[in-house]
Amino acid sequence: VTVLDQLIKDFSRLPGIGNKSAARLVYYLLKADPKLSEKLSENILKLKKCIRPCAVCGNYTENELCGICSDSSRDKSLLCIVEQSQDLAVIESVNEYNGVYHVLGGCISPLDGMGPEQLGIPALLKRLDKESLREIIIATNPTVEGDTTALYLLKVLKEKNIRITRLASGLPVGGDLEYAGKLTLVRSLKGRIEYNL
Ligand SMILES: [Zn+2]
């Protein structure tokens, strides 16, 4: 296999990239400034070496704490639970939320071997014992697994005696937060609904 073919194959393993797009990227790199390839390979290597989960919330960071956890202007009494760092980034992008987060790193999915332990839910419960919260927003994705995770969280968070809310409906069902339009996301954050416990 030539380097060319191998690289096309490698690119096509990335999400959302088929064989054609992979070939387009590789042929583009061949023609482009060599600096682009250098920067790309450097940063891809750095990605795995330098990025780690925040010690408090699990968000990706290059430091011990992520930018949000170390920001003193954030409202630490408001906690939003999301599945992935990407979901956090989507919520941040609409500039509507000033609380902190907890990133689960996935959702409950028995078929994939993902249970409460794998998602660090025991660690989340410990974290909650140390913090005085006034509200927890459950912002898992509007999918079957996301809803299962939300129900589980609800069950274990109930006894903490904290107001628990979820994003208002209007988010595309079956999709990820990242596919929701900004306006929809702002509306669902503003109009969040309290769970009746
Ligand atoms: Zn953090």
Image (cartoon, grey):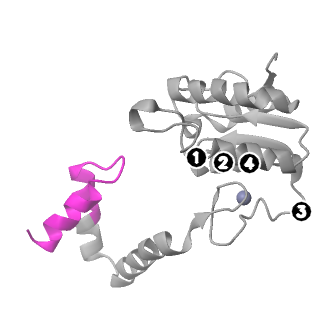
Cα separation, mark 3 vs mark 4, equals 14 Å
Give the crowd class for mark 4: few <14, some 14-19, many >=20 residues within 10 Å: many
Q: Left or right: where does residue 17 sit relative to residue 66? A: left
Q: Amino acid at mark 3?
A: Ser
Q: Is mark 4 within 8 Å of ligand 1?
A: yes
- Circles 2 and 1, Cβ within 8 Å, touching? The answer is yes
Q: Which residue is mark 1?
A: 84
Q: Left or right: where does residue 93 sit relative to residue 22? A: right
Q: Which stretch did the figure color magenta?
A: 1-25
Q: Which residue is mark 3?
A: 72
Q: Is residue 22 magenta?
A: yes
Q: Which circle's residue, 3 or 4, is located before the other in the chain?
A: 3
The answer to which quarter of the image holds residue 112 is top left
Observer-nearest residue: 124 or 141? 124
On the image, the x and y values in percent for residue 147 come to 59, 24
Q: Residue at x 80, y 43 (%)?
A: 79
Q: Nearer the viewer, mark 2 or mark 4?
A: 4
On the image, the x and y values in percent for residue 76 come to 87, 51
Q: Is residue 174 visible?
A: no
Q: Secondary structure at mark 2?
A: helix
Q: Residue at x 80, y 65 (%)?
A: 70
Q: Which circle's residue, 2 or 4, is located before the other in the chain?
A: 2
Q: Residue at x 26, y 54 (%)?
A: 12
- Circles 2 and 4, Cβ within 8 Å, touching? The answer is yes
Q: Nearer the viewer, mark 2 or mark 1?
A: 1
